[in-house]
Image (spheres, helix red, strand yellow):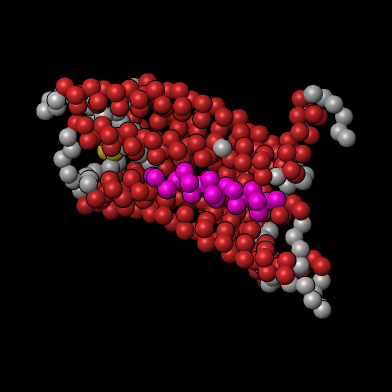
Amino acid sequence: MSNITIANSSLISTSPSQAQLIEFVNFLNKIISQYGLAVIWLIGNIGSILMCIVFTQPTYRHSPCAIFFLAASLSQFFTYNFALLTHMLCNGYGVYALRNSLWYCKLLSYLLYISVSIPRYDIILASMDRYFASSPEVIYRQRSSPKIAFRLILANVLIWSLLYIQVIVIYDIEDGICTYPSNAYGIFFSIYIALDTGVLPLLLMLTFGLLTVRNVHQMKNRIGPGVRPNQTRLSRKDLQLHRMLANQIVLFVILNVPNPAYLIYQSITLRLLDSPLRRTSEVFAESMTYVLIYLGFSLTFCNFMISSTIFRREFHRLIRTKILRRPDL
């Protein structure tokens, strides 16, 4: 998670033109944080609630992949109302709640990290499930089950809750900023975050995504004597779950690449003294990489609506029966 700050627009050692540029960048960061994040927060919360409702319907109730999507939707609700909301209040409205108490700084930073990591790895678990579900080997397909899905979801929560305990230990308030220290461990932590939040998820999603595509292709071509029909084709629902996940992975890759790239840059330049203009630019760049991450989460519902006719049908049925109070067709 980013060190949420607004760059100091001090005019010391800056030319008038640089001072104006610093002022403009800070203003741009403030406007995007106020209005852009507010729109993402609203769309994300509505989408998260709707996805939770759709994925609890009988059509999806026993699908392991849908269970992972449901878990991700629940986790995203906390992402919007912990990570995104804190970012918006701080950069957009100057509400520096993290500065007021050291333990509040530590605890909220801890919750910010896990609220972003858990939904991200729920999607990775969904991609692993699709790989096993599409495997031509029975022993692998048996690993795609609701029972295993629930166990992995619980393990996902526990693992990230334990791994990020280090945030409670190392985070401190320095110069009015809640952040990790700029020492050797700070450099290690910055690199660790770059790998954990960007590089590793990208590699896992792409790996299992490509393996799933290969399995589906092999399954379509695996027609011959002794091969039963259910071994050569996937159900319509499974194919659409594949498409939903594939589009989500593409969305994740496009919108998440800037963040690990910035974090790697940050780890390299952590001990360098920044000019006011450079520091302002870095804060703005960091802030925008997280805006892209939140945007990716908020577009999940739209992606599912576009990718799956079954998901659209279930959503329309809920609107018709629960809101318009019309009989189910």
Residue 213 as seen in the image, left or right of residue 206: right
- The answer to which quarter of the image holds residue 209 is bottom right
- The answer to which quarter of the image holds residue 323 is top right
For the residue pair 305 and 20, the one nearer the viewer reads as: 20
Q: Quadrant of the N terminus?
A: top left
Whether the magenta-drawn stretch holds residue 257 is answered as yes
Q: Please determine whether, in this image, residue 158 is positioned above or below residue 276.
A: below
For the residue pair 142 and 22, the one nearer the viewer reads as: 22
At horizontal 28% and vertical 42% (from top left) the residue drawn is 180
Q: Position of residue 179 (x, y in %)?
A: 29, 38
Residue 271 as seen in the image, left or right of residue 199: left
Examine the rendering and report whether any part of residue 202 can be seen.
yes
At horizontal 64% and vertical 58% (from top left) the residue drawn is 130
- Name the outermost residue toward the bottom: 225
What are the residue bounds of the magenta stretch? 240-259
Q: Position of residue 315 (x, y in %)?
A: 73, 35
Examine the rendering and report whether any part of residue 63 can be seen.
no
Q: Quadrant of the C terminus?
A: top right
Whether the magenta-drawn stretch holds residue 146 is answered as no
At horizontal 56% and vertical 37% (from top left) the residue drawn is 299
Q: Position of residue 224 (x, y in %)?
A: 79, 76
For the residue pair 51 and 103, the one nearer the viewer reads as: 51
- Name the outermost residue toward the left: 13
At horizontal 46% and vertical 27% (from top left) the residue drawn is 36
Magenta segment, principal secondary structure?
helix
